[in-house]
Image (spheres, rainbow, N blue to C red):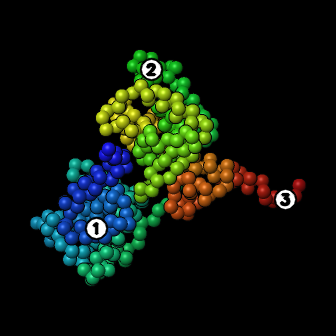
């Protein structure tokens, strides 16, 4: 019997095809660079790099009069030596707002840093191999990232969110009530799972029914980079999943989607966008002051786990962070409750 292709294996195949399509539009010499980073990066990362570097070539073609009669496929590696540090500073400014066909694109601090980082890596490859004489990317400063405060749900908001998913249909009628009843157990299981394990939305939609182990109350998730890990869940997640699976048994999936844990109303595997819309819909009924996404539910879990255990290494491990410094940056700061303690800790005068 032929082994089935998992969701993550199929995604990798689709991404490989997509990367080849993007590279086919870029200068031919670029293929050497992408081949060199194949073993150390995911296909999804290489696709992001390809898009980012292609924007750089589009900038050169649109802004350099000497290239007005050239196409991207005409460019050779020596074009990199014609770029000066000042050109890259202009490129940074260009990236903030530019036209992409009939769309206006913008980049904030993180988008700018990612695109300049991709370009630095690109230049470094050809410079090390002595295919170019200069590397102007090391002469410009990297865009600075200003740290934003983490948005998360408070404990009472978590309760309100889950209660709303479980009972919010009481005030609905007609088709809206019917849709709510049809998806209630799925939605409650999905949001409870995100809040109770901190898994990424991409990991959630990639779950197969075979990945759920009620004997040990664990799910096998495929992390960034393809590594698999068992994440354990508590009794609340267990109950929500079992309630949903009882409903799932009555669903006949579309061919090719039989193994998916979470089905859409079209009886296919749910996608990232569908989960994002689902979370946004329910969360907007609970709080309008916070823009809640699946990632914010992950932050909510990480915060709660750190507050309960004080173990930053455990939080890093469960969340699948490769570098504990990433976790420290997000969760080991002085929380509001501790800041309030500071207010009464210092006495200015003895009274």
> Looking at the picture, how far across and down is residue 318, in whole percent?
56, 53
Asked if residue 165 shows in the view, the reply is no
Name the mark nearer the viewer: 1 or 3: 1
Q: Residue furthest top?
A: 174
**Alpha carbon separation for disc pair 1 and 2:** 53 Å
Q: Earlier in the sequence, mark 2 or mark 3?
A: 2
Pointer 1 local density, CA inside 10 Å: few below 14, some 14–19, many at least 20? few
Question: Distance of mark 2 from mark 3, alpha carbons?
Answer: 62 Å
> Residue 257, position in %: x, y?
34, 37
Query: Does the CB distance between marks 1 and 2 fall below 8 Å?
Result: no
Q: Is residue 340 left or right of residue 350?
A: left
User: In the rendered view, does 147 fall on the left or right side of 97?
Assistant: right
Q: What residue lies at 61% left-to-right and 56% top-to-bottom?
A: 314
Side of 136 relative to 198 (left or right): left
In this rendering, which labeled residue sits more in front, label 1 or label 2? 1
Q: Quadrant of residue 236?
A: top right
**Which residue is rendered at x = 37% and y = 76% of the image?**
138
- Residue situated in front as seen by the camera: 310 or 339: 310
SS class, disc 2:
helix
For this rendering, which residue is in front, 141 or 16? 16
Point 56% across, 62% down: residue: 324
Above or below, comparing residue 15 to residue 196 in the picture: below
Instruction: Pick whichever of labels 1 and 2 is earlier in the sequence.
Output: 1
Mark 3 residue element? loop
In the visual, does 167 lie left or right of 87? right
Q: Does dot 1 land on a helix, a strand or a loop?
A: helix
Q: Earlier in the sequence, mark 1 or mark 3?
A: 1
* Circle 1 residue: 35
Q: Position of residue 87 (x, y in %)?
A: 28, 72
- Location of mark 3 (residue): 349
């Amino acid at each position: 019997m032929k082994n089935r292709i998992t969701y993550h294996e199929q995604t990798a195949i689709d991404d490989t095809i997509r990367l080849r399509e993007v590279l086919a539009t870029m200068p031919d010499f670029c293929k050497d660079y992408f081949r060199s980073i194949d073993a150390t990066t995911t296909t999804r990362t290489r696709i992001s790099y390809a898009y980012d570097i292609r924007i750089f070539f589009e900038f050169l073609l649109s802004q350099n009069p000497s290239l007005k009669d050239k196409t991207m496929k005409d460019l050779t590696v020596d074009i990199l030596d014609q770029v000066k540090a000042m050109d890259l500073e202009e490129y940074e400014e260009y990236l903030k707002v530019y036209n992409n066909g009939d769309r206006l694109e913008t980049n904030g601090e993180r988008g700018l840093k990612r695109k300049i980082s991709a370009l630095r890596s690109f230049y470094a490859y050809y410079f090390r191999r002595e295919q170019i004489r200069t590397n102007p990317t090391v002469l410009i400063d990297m865009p600075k990232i200003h740290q934003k405060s983490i948005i998360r749900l408070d404990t009472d908001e978590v309760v309100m969110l889950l209660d709303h998913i479980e009972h919010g249909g009481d005030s609905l009628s007609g088709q809206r009530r019917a849709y709510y009843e049809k998806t209630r157990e799925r939605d409650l299981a999905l949001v409870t799972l995100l809040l109770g394990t901190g898994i990424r939305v991409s990991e959630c939609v990639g779950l197969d029914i075979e990945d759920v182990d009620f004997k040990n109350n664990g799910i096998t998730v495929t992390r960034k980079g393809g590594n698999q890990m068992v994440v354990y869940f508590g009794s609340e997640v267990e109950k929500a999943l079992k309630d949903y699976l009882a409903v799932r048994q009555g669903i006949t999936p579309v061919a090719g989607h039989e193994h998916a844990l979470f089905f859409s109303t079209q009886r296919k595997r749910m996608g990232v966008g569908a989960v994002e819309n689902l979370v946004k819909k329910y969360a907007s009924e609970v709080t309008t002051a916070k823009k809640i996404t699946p990632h914010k539910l992950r932050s909510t879990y990480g915060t709660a786990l750190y507050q309960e255990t004080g173990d930053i290494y455990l939080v890093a491990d469960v969340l699948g962070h490769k570098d504990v410094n990433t976790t420290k940056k997000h969760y080991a700061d002085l929380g509001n409750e501790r800041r309030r303690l500071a207010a009464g800790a210092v006495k200015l005068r003895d009274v």
